[in-house]
Image: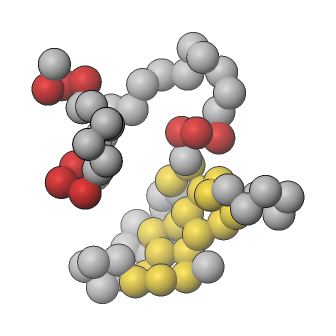
């Protein structure tokens, strides 16, 4: 699936063929980058995210660890 970001740059999303979950996406603006959904990793020791994007659009129950 391909759509434009709020900034007008194309992003290509890739999904699991079995369940349809987002797996990774490729931002056209950063051709050397691939973003992977943290939820794809079942490892409880997986490192916590280090960047937050669009915090103003998050659900009310999502807490930014830096805000604690």
Residue 46 is situated, as x and y percent measured from the top left of the image, at 55, 22
The residue at the point 42 percent across, 25 percent down is 48
Q: Is residue 66 above or below residue 40?
A: above
- The answer to which image quadrant residue 14 occupies is bottom right
x and y percentages locating residue 4 in the rendered image: 40, 83
- In this rendered view, identify the residue nearer to me: 29 or 23: 23
Image quadrant containing the N terminus? bottom right
Residue 2 image position (x, y, % from top left): 55, 82
Q: Is residue 54 above or below residue 14?
A: above
Q: Is residue 67 left or right of residue 49?
A: left
Q: Residue at x 39, y 32 (%)?
A: 49
Tell me the residue at 73%/62% (across/down). Answer: 20
The answer to whether residue 64 is above or below residue 16 is above
Indicate the position of residue 15 as horizontal and vertical percent values.
Answer: 70, 63
> Going by the picture, which residue comes out furthest to the front?
60
Determine the residue located farthest toward the right in the rendered image.
18
The image quarter in which residue 45 lies: top right
- State which quarter of the image contains the C terminus: top left
Number of marks: 0
């Amino acid at each position: 699936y391909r759509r434009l970001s709020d900034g007008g740059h194309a992003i290509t999303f890739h999904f699991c063929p079995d369940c349809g979950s987002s797996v990774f996406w490729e931002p056209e603006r950063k051709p050397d980058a691939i973003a992977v959904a943290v939820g794809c990793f079942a490892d409880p020791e997986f490192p916590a995210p280090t960047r937050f994007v669009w915090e103003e659009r998050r659900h009310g129950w999502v807490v930014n660890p830096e805000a604690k």
